[in-house]
Image (cartoon, helix red, strand yellow):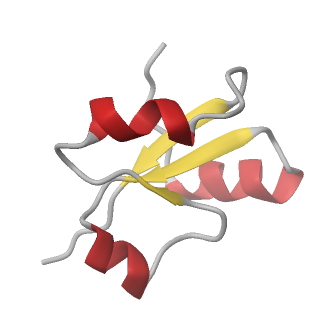
Amino acid sequence: MVANIGRYELKAKMDRGDPIILLEVLAPQYYRHSHLPGALNLPPGKVAEVAPDLLPHKEAEIVLYCWDAA
């Protein structure tokens, strides 16, 4: 199931300690500059090759996010 959540819902999930995996979908240089605590980098165009190794907890909710770099 795919659903959109807002920043306040995400913060509530993080504060509660819900089992989530945060994946930042931006180029590595943006990830190095700034990312949410605990987020993993999933560079655009490399999803198929990188994602299987980044998802150790198969039952956790996966949250993809990206910052507006503009």
Give residue 68's quadrant in the image: bottom left
Direction left: furthest residue: 70
The one of 36 and 13 positioned closer to us in this rendering? 36
In the rendered image, the vertical position of residue 14 relative to residue 3, given as above or below: below
Residue 19 at x, y = what percent? 78, 38
Residue 13 at x, y = what percent? 74, 48
Q: Quadrant of the C terminus?
A: bottom left
Direction bottom: furthest residue: 33
Residue 30 at x, y = what percent? 30, 77
The one of 45 and 39 positioned closer to us in this rendering? 45
In the rendered image, the vertical position of residue 70 relative to residue 46, given as above or below: below
- Residue at 56% of width from left, 70% of height from top? 36
Give residue 24's quadrant in the image: bottom left
Direction top: furthest residue: 1
- Residue at 58% of width from left, 35% of height from top? 55
Give the number of marks.
0
Side (left or right) of 48 relative to 15:
left
- Residue at 62% of width from left, 43% of height from top? 21
Give residue 11's quadrant in the image: bottom right
